[in-house]
Image (cartoon, rainbow, N blue to C red):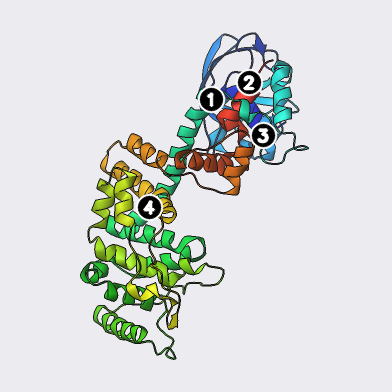
Amino acid sequence: MREDLLHFIWKYRKLPLKGLVTSNGQKIEIFEVGIHNHFAGPDFFNAKIRLEGQLWAGNVEIHVKASDWYAHGHEKDANYNAVILHVVWEDDVAVFRGDASEIPTLELKRHIPDYLLSNYQNLFDKRHKRFINCEKSIGEIDLFVFRNWLDRLYFERLEGKSMRLQNLLKESKNNWEQVLFNALLKNFGSKINGESFSSLGGALDFSIIRKIQNDSFKLESVFFGLMGLLTNHSIKDIYYINMSKEYGYIKAKYQLDDRGIRQPEFFKLRPANFPTIRLSQLANLYSVHPNLFSEVIEAASTTELYSIFTVSASSYWDTHFTFGKESRRSTKKLTKAFIDLLIVNTIIPLKFCHAQYTGKEINEEIAMLASQLKREENNIVKNFDDHRIKATNAFESQALLQLYNEYCIKNRCLECAVGTTILNRNN
């Protein structure tokens, strides 16, 4: 037995609300189970019960064993003095408040339907689990229920992403251009260089970018210089030498400080993802779109966003992946797949966060944008495919990632629409 099942039973009234008695034989009626508290303090606030004809309003605490009250030290915590009912699976000891008054206890053992316990045991039976707890049943869930749950999961995931943007907004003193720049840096750095690129955003104020962004060469030189990519004096490439000189001039002029910036990695990366290529693409993006933040906020379709982000690295990189080493000629343009990732991980969360900040309602627009993008291809999404849950676009694949990472692997089945549906089956 686990507390989460007892919480579920109480919250969703899976027990008789009348005809109950406490462990001391007092008649009890439940009128309101209260508000579920997921933080410190009693488990349910503002419950209402009638005990031997007397109406009580207060809090409810739930434990597997009554003795857990003392194991958790509640008798020493004034926050628990307003508990009017102790709900337990097994009543093994009398429980008292700080003023020595006994708290009525309701033991649930005899009141839980057999089907509920059986469903619970089957759901958490790990012996045959290969992917998720409900893998045998998830494909049978009513489509309407599941679609509504995916909608909620998608925006729940979006809320989590927007929290980082809110922190960036606070750090930048409400400079949305700086927020966008920092968010793009992390995504241009991808998994391997995301933190390294982010450290550049922490050291480079966007006001400097504003002053030099009309010249992509200057902007590139600042990016490369601050990232420590212009320190190899053995390279005799004229482009490299000129860029080093340009960076030295700009660094002195604007008193740039490269301390604390992490040098990027090249190891394990495909050449098209080298930091040199990504930084050049980002520099050209800002050179071509001086009002980038306004453009992405106003863009209402993926077509408009593709138009904005279809940029290439500078012409030098047509024949290079690193300084001084020539390669076969190819234009280093941002691919559609990479732009999709930028839209999913940066642009949509930015739009969502900005709408919250300005009090606008754009959830439908955001859902439409995400639905126009291809789904991600990763092991989690493919595993759901194998269990008859197929994401058809990025909106659905993002929702499935939220489901897996925040519910499935954390065993939060009783907080999930799929888990609660399975638990409630009586057949």
Q: Position of residue 217 (x, y in %)?
A: 28, 75
Instruction: State which quadrant residue 108 falls in.
Output: top right
Left or right, 91 with respect to 406, comes to right
Q: Earlier in the sequence, mark 1 or mark 2?
A: 1
Left or right, 210 with respect to 345, comes to left
Q: Amino acid at mark 3?
A: Glu
Q: Earlier in the sequence, mark 1 or mark 3?
A: 3
Give the spatial CA distance, label 1 vs label 3. 16 Å
Q: How many marks?
A: 4
For marks 4 and 1, give the one nearer the viewer.
1
Give the spatial CA distance, label 4 vs label 1. 33 Å
Instruction: Say if residue 230 shows up in the picture.
Output: yes
On the image, numbered disc 3 is attached to which residue?
A: 135
Q: Residue at x 56, y 28 (%)?
A: 417
Q: Crowding at label 4, few (<14), some or many (≥20) Cα neighbours within 10 Å?
A: many
For marks 2 and 3, give the one nearer the viewer.
3
On the image, numbered disc 2 is attached to which residue?
A: 424
Instruction: Say if residue 175 shows up in the picture.
Output: no
Q: Position of residue 196 (x, y in %)?
A: 46, 68
